[in-house]
């Protein structure tokens, strides 16, 4: 049953650097290796925010998993352990919400480095429990293992009627492009925290941190809520978006995912981007363009969705913003355009912070 | 919705070292923090090899997740990437088999360090694909992220009739204690590989490795198969074990899990332990007691099960060994006894290689 033992396990010849293909390139590569699922119960495999498979009676389950690793996804120096537990659940619940489904069960695995104490693990689990209460999720499994750095790996199972599931590929030309809440705040929070840390290192005990002007954006970074309420409001209003995705990698990147999967283009308007005043102030403080935060910052965990204009009336206008519309793709290489506040209409590249990308994005 | 932002994230006062409570102590701690699931569809939470929840029509799904991390669970110097992919699936499928269920879907997440190439990821996925073919599993989701070391995190969803699921807590006094295949081989393989590596470091290019005498045990360590065939044979024979668990942490540890969950004791016989000649030769080569390998080595991924003697007749006698029996627990602190080949009957402690334990076990 197991593959034959190879003589020379990992030959070093002709190795391709992962950064040459990028994260999304690699996933596409893997999808090709594994081929399309030949199990008829699988409705959707490696293609959307969560996998979808039938469980009978017209219902489907959705499966998603995500890991937060110290030094990669968070800095232990400024991440309260309770928030870490909360966030690990949120990012997974967000993937389920992004399929228009309800989260049900979670499995939580903690990778422990030597610096981690029982009390820290306890705090992580208290954050997990708070998230479970907030999202109506039940933790059904847990595990601990040794690791080089503290890590938290969560799997969430969601549930929905098969006909209620919304994919990223359903956008129609003419749909309004909408986003819940506000965007760019998580990245602004990260900037404020990183500067705080740097100053602490430079000035030592003399440093008097004042993070009050950044309390909202920091909160958005450390303990982002998943937009499950929006999904429930849609169900209550009898509304089902055409296309749906959550904003984890950055708005620009997610819009490209929607356009690619839907075979459409999109027109986005800079003045329509919903940006919190604190996010704006943070960008000003750093002398940076707040639209960069909003388009490429990522980790917002808001929902991006498309609907025809007349269906938007059924929704609470406070709960979302129209930021553009779905268009015919004039040029498949440049499907998304961004009209700046000065009227210039420029092609927008995905440019979100690809984990293996290189450098800062530019408009 | 998110918890309040704390001023001082992680106070260093009164921290308890994880090694003070151990891995199983920590999991018990977490179970207490999270409380019993109040979702009626959950049949079994953090208590067995996999979580169990109802999906309707008398059927349940089972959920398990496990991660292999470079430098903790494997050494990249002697782990072919294809085997890594295969093993990551096997250890999860083994948890599903250990509930008497069929694996169905998998999600595979790769954590990439900078040393990892596209070709290596490709090889990992080829091993994953081989395991999927062997176990009839469909990969429905995949993800890559950056990490400090190469890691492979797999979640598997299994399926069964609710009445077919077997838990570790069902052992009855008088049951025969049985194990599939042979045990201790994986640990013997690890020893041979580690010595090989050490000699390579000492002797450099002059070193001529000869791993031929260890080919079986090395294979058992690097690419252990899950015992899914056994589960299918039981179904075909109409047999359902009373208690069932897979041997991941070591036979002694797993027997204690069964006894604790079942409220029983157990009597084990040294001469009955199924040990491959190559495992025995490896222990002799190292001047060590092969029973230590069998009892505490772990990573065998064989199945430990209990059944009344008369039900064993329905099974292929080549497929398992009777290694002891379930007893009344005379002393709850010492539920398991081990009769040595010389006739001495000694209490057996769990002593498997707890990830946070200290030092070598002794009989």
Image: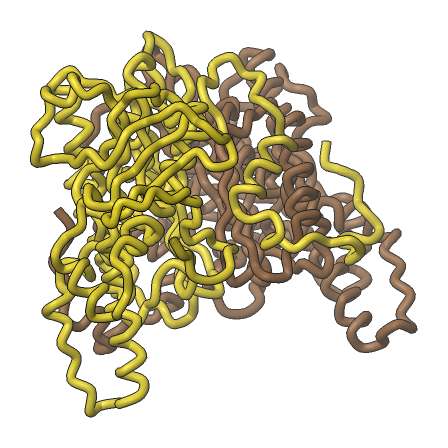
Chain colours: A yellow, B brown
Q: Is residue A224 left or right of residue B311?
A: left
Query: In the image shown, does B244 or B141 lie closer to the viewer?
Result: B141
Q: Tell me if I can see residue B166 in this picture.
A: no
Count of numbered labels shown in the rendering = 0
Q: Is residue A18 left or right of residue A109?
A: right
Which residue is located at x 18 percent, y 45 percent? Answer: A274
Q: Position of residue A137 (x, y in %)?
A: 23, 35
Which residue is located at x 52 percent, y 52 percent? Answer: B111
Image height of A128 relative to A27, above or below: below
Q: Position of residue A231 (x, y in %)?
A: 20, 28
Q: Tell me if I can see residue A264 in this picture.
A: yes
Quarter the C terminus of chain B occupies: bottom right
Which residue is located at x 52 percent, y 35 percent? Answer: A333
Which residue is located at x 38 percent, y 44 percent? Answer: A346
Image height of B28 relative to A238, above or below: below
Q: Position of residue A55 (x, y in %)?
A: 38, 15
Determine the image quadrant of residue A98.
top left
Farthest front residue? A343
Image height of B107 relative to A343, above or below: above
Q: Position of residue A143 (x, y in %)?
A: 39, 48
Query: In the image shown, does A244 or A160 lie closer to the viewer?
Result: A244
Q: Is residue A170 left or right of residue A333?
A: left
Image height of B186 relative to A103, above or below: below
């Amino acid at each position: 049953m197991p593959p034959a033992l190879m003589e020379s396990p990992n030959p070093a010849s002709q190795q391709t650097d992962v950064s040459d293909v990028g994260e999304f390139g690699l996933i596409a590569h893997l999808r090709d290796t594994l081929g399309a699922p030949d199990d008829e119960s699988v409705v959707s495999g490696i293609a959307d925010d969560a996998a979808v498979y039938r469980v009978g009676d017209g219902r489907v389950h959705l499966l998603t998993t995500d890991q937060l690793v110290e030094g990669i996804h968070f800095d232990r120096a400024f991440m309260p352990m309770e928030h870490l537990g909360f966030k690990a659940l949120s990012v997974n619940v967000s993937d389920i919400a992004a399929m228009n489904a309800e989260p049900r069960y979670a499995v939580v695995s903690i990778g422990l480095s030597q610096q981690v104490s029982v009390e820290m693990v306890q705090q992580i689990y208290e954050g997990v429990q708070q998230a479970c209460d907030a999202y109506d999720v039940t933790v059904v499994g847990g595990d601990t293992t040794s690791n080089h750095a503290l890590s938290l790996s969560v799997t969430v199972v969601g549930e929905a009627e098969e006909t209620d599931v919304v994919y990223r590929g359903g956008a129609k030309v003419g749909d309004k492009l909408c986003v819940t809440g506000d965007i760019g705040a998580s990245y602004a929070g990260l900037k404020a925290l990183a500067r705080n840390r740097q100053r602490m290192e430079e000035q030592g005990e003399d440093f008097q941190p004042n993070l009050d002007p950044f309390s909202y954006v920091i909160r958005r970074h450390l303990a982002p809520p998943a937009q499950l309420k929006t999904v429930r409001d849609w169900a209550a209003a009898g509304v089902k978006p055409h296309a749906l995705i959550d904003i984890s990698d950055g708005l620009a990147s997610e819009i490209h995912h929607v356009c690619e999967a839907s075979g459409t283009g999109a027109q986005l308007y800079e003045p329509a981007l919903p940006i919190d005043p604190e996010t704006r102030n943070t960008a000003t403080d750093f002398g940076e363009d707040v639209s960069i935060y909003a388009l490429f910052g990522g980790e917002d965990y808001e929902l991006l969705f498309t609907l025809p204009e007349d269906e938007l009336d059924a929704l609470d206008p406070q709960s979302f913003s129209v930021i553009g519309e779905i268009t015919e793709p004039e040029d498949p290489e440049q499907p998304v355009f961004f009209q700046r506040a000065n009227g210039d209409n420029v092609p927008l590249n995905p440019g979100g912070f690809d984990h293996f990308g290189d450098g800062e994005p530019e408009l």
